[in-house]
Image (tube, coloured by chain):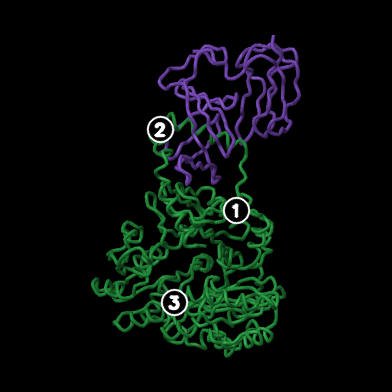
Amino acid sequence: MNKILVANRGEIAVRIIRACREMGIATVAVYSECDRTALHVRLADEACAIGPNAPRESYLNIERILTAARTTGADAVHPGYGFLAENEEFAKAVIDQGLTFIGPTPDAIALMGSKTAARLAARRAGVPLVPGTETPLGKDVSDAEIEKAANAVGYPLLVKAVSGGGGKGMRTVVEREDLLGAVRRARSEAGAAFGDSSVYFERRISRPRHVEIQLLGDHHGTVLPFVERECSIQRRHQKVVEESPSLAVTPQIRHAMMSAAAAVARAVGYTNAGTIEFLLDEDGRFYFLEMNTRLQVEHPVTEMVTGIDLVRWQIRIARGERLDLDPERLATPVGHAIECRIYAEDPDNAFLPSPGKIVQLRVPSGPGIRDDSGASAGREVPIFYDPLVSKLIAWAEDRPAAIARMRRALSEYVIAGIKTTIPFFAWLLTQPEFVGGEFHTSYLDEVLSDRNGRSFVEVEEAAETVAAMAVALRAVLSPEATAADTDGTSAEGDRRWRALARAEGVR
Amino acid sequence: MTVGGERWRGPRAYADVRYEVDVNGRVLHVDVHRVNGSFVVTVDGHEWTIDAARVDAHTLSLLVGSSSQEVTIAPDTVPGQLAVGIRGVPLSATLNGRRRWSRGDDGGASGGPQRLTAPMPGKIVRVLAKVGTAVQPRQPLVVVEAMKMENELRAIRNGIVSEVLVQEGQSVDAGTLLLVVAPE
């Protein structure tokens, strides 16, 4: 393997290019029109334009990506996460062209991509499941049959899209009479997002945690599970903070969960990197939720507590090497790691997207801090893609120290020109529930609903005085800069974006 | 040029100017004077000596007394507004019209007693006058510490201290009445 095409953009493309550079492997970046000057393009050895900004015409366009691979003579493709990462057609097309796909086999992607097939695989491996329907409820299933299936599962229940992900096509039903309406809404959302309106039901576990197990599997039959990641801090089913290890996981639970995850992966002959998600209830029982057949956004927290470079191992496994890591090491976290997903969203304005030009960027550093980002000063956060600006990861010898370190890093982070979720994280990391580790998957949504839009920022009067002084002094010292910043033209793009975001109902 | 009745000594390299700055909806009057390489800045009648250095187009380093404050200023998402960042805390500001500091302007003070209030929550570090003390314009009366800055609160004109309502070491809220100067 001499040259890898990275079929992605943003921070994950940068992350993969970095691993390749360290391994002496050449890289090919692909980019849409607005990403011509993006960091991943500048860091790669070669770069190919693959079309217009709309994802469907560039980062989701299999033909153009394969043409870029042919033109540049790449011999492998890394899909990152999102876009085509869990598309078995893409994996198959890459392989059919004689290239290596750095990820699981197309069959494994297809199998585990179906939620009901994945549940069946977990059941066969003897792993407990949340009670639920065993077969998909397609669009032709009658209302009577839907009600019968729901009664068998029991209320409260979740309606979930069979091909879903990221909380799309998901509804909670507490009362029987809300069932059919919830199914209709979930179907229409799932149909629009995934082209498949099939749904299934799952019993809703009370106040569960979301805990997941990272795995690596090689092509010689070895599957190794890692220490868990705690991902219960979610907003509308989207993870916003992840950490490892979990305060709720005892050594016994960890051992059982790792064994269960490895059993599921072995049962389907899984290769490369993947993650098995579990719900952990208040009594320490866990249930298989689903498998993600890709590298996860939150993989760095695992890397920080185990010292293993997961992307490097993805590449080594793909070129046929044996997974010869010490299983004990993977099960034994050193210290504690926390990740905050910093988004271009305005937390004080219902987390509305806030793209625009980053005019100033200072990234925190120092002991235990890692910033995985694709952003750079002078560049726009484009309106076409996920508004993730950076993943800020703090590692320290224990959890309180990691929290303190993260707070320190957040206070150093300067991203000017757009609004970000940094003030929200600064607030969250002081909350007693977070500090005490007393939370579950609905915790954040409940607190946010209680706050009812109250600002996360508490400004002291002294800070207002300093701000007034600074604005006045800058007007004296840099009158041109002040004039440029207040003439209103730079905000033009943001207004355009916000209008578009509302029109499309983004988030 | 006079400020609060005292002869102004500073060089005129920069025009002495007054700004109205709206910070998070609160309007603050800021007077900026260049003096011997530093700035004397008055915010709503309270005065600080500041060393201000431009780091880049969007970053200022201020030494307010010895308190180090890094401030980033960039266009806000609302046109015409400024997004200000201070140690991770975002604020929104608008710079309103400026006007030259005019001769004979006494900083807004007119007849009647000067009721000195705390401009921000903080701790009383020193009380520099007693009941009956005759004070001159710009004479320091009380020092309040807030956000690691010592702020000297001064007399705005001639008078006699008629009431002292705080003691050294006491914590005060913003707006607490500290001391009253009766006109002569």
Q: Are marks 1 and 3 in contact (CB under 8 Å)?
A: no
Tell me what hue chain B is rendered in. Answer: purple
Q: Is residue B11 above or below residue A71?
A: above
- Identify the residue at image location x=39%, y=53%: A380
Viewer-proximal residue, A436 or A225?
Answer: A436
Q: Is A260 on the left or on the right of B39, as rendered?
A: right
Q: What is the C-alpha distance between the residues marked 3 and 2?
A: 50 Å
Q: First in sequence: mark 3 or mark 2? A: 3
Q: Chain of mark 3?
A: A
Residue A263 shows in this picture: no
Give the colour of chain A: green
Labelled pair 1, 2 in contact (Cβ < 8 Å): no
> Mark 1 is on which residue type?
Ala
Pick the quarter of the image with the N terminus of chain A: bottom left
Q: Amino acid at mark 3?
A: Glu
Query: Which is more N-terminal, label 2 or label 1?
Result: 1
Q: Secondary structure at mark 3?
A: loop
What secondary structure is found at the residue carrying circle 1?
Answer: helix
Q: Position of residue A189 (x, y in %)?
A: 52, 73
Q: Which residue matches tag 2?
A: A478
Q: Which residue is mark 1?
A: A404
- Read off the chain for label 2: A
Answer above or below: position of A176 versus A481.
below
Label 2 crowding class (10 Å Cα cut-off): few <14, some 14-19, many 20+? some
Find the distance from the CA under tag 1 to the CA under tag 3: 36 Å
Residue pointed to by mark 3: A86
Disc 2 element = loop
